[in-house]
Amino acid sequence: MNMSDASKLCQTHNGSFNAIYMRGSRNGEERRIQNERREFSLRTLLKCTVSPRRFTGRRREDRRFPKLDCFESALGFLAVGLVILSIIDATFTLKLISLGGEEVNPFMLWMMNQSISAFVATKMLLTAVPAIVLVATANHTFFGIVRARSILAALVGLYIGLIVYEIGLLSIAMG
């Protein structure tokens, strides 16, 4: 098989072969016909945190909301901030309960009745996992309306509001 053939086979990263059909024209038209081969997974997220490569999208469809190997540091700060606010919320919730308050979330009340460790672990898990997913999908839009990064920022804002509310309750209960 030589380069003048109408098609050639190329091996992909998973060992399978895709046919790439080359047209002879170089006037800007698409010269290859194949399925999308880029993949995005949690492995991608792990690899990009260790050795990021791209800061901007290379392909036309990636330039509006690109899938990148490197995530903005602001997203990391938001995710870490969300988890820290969740820890503060758990601490304030436990303090308010010790002062006579009640947990209004039935699931978290059930977890608290199992053990305090189960309550805290569940709270951290239910905050950290969505934070990681929102960072990994930061440039994707949900329902064609809102990007994941906006949801992450909104959650941080809501948690700040919750902490302010709990501080108010603590000042009333201790005051």
Image (cartoon, rainbow, N blue to C red):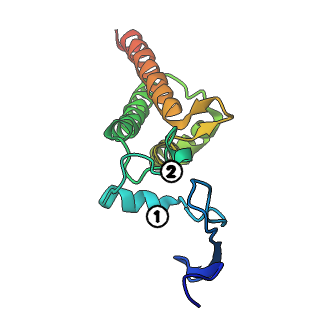
Identify which amino acid the numbered label 2 is placed on: Arg
In the image, residue 36 above or below residue 61: below
Q: Nearer the viewer, residue 82 or 165?
A: 82
Could you tell me residue 152's position as x and y percent?
48, 33
Judging from the image, what secondary structure is the residue with disc 2 in?
loop
Identify which amino acid the numbered label 1 is placed on: Arg
| Mark 2 surroundings: few (<14), some (14-19) or many (≥20) residues within 10 A | few
Whichever of callouts 1 and 2 sits on the residue coming sooner in the sequence is: 1
Judging from the image, what secondary structure is the residue with disc 1 in?
helix
Q: Nearer the viewer, residue 130 or 151?
A: 151
Side of 81 where 114 appears, left or right: right
Residue drawn 38% across the image and 35% down it: 78
Q: Report the Cα–Cα distance between label 1 and label 2.
A: 22 Å
In the image, residue 109 above or below residue 36: above
Could you tell me residue 112's position as x and y percent?
53, 41
Quarter of the image containing the N terminus? bottom right
Label at residue 59: 2
What residue did someone put label 1 on?
A: 43
Residue drawn 35% across the image and 14% down it: 174
In the image, residue 43 above or below residue 61: below
Is residue 122 visible in the rendered image? The answer is no
Query: Residue placed farthest to the bottom in the image?
Result: 1
Residue drawn 62% across the image and 83% down it: 5
Residue drawn 61% across the image and 81% down it: 8
Marks 1 & 2, CB-CB < 8 Å contact: no
Could you tell me residue 162's position as x and y percent?
47, 21
In the image, residue 137 above or below residue 37: above
Camera-near label (1 vs 2) is: 2
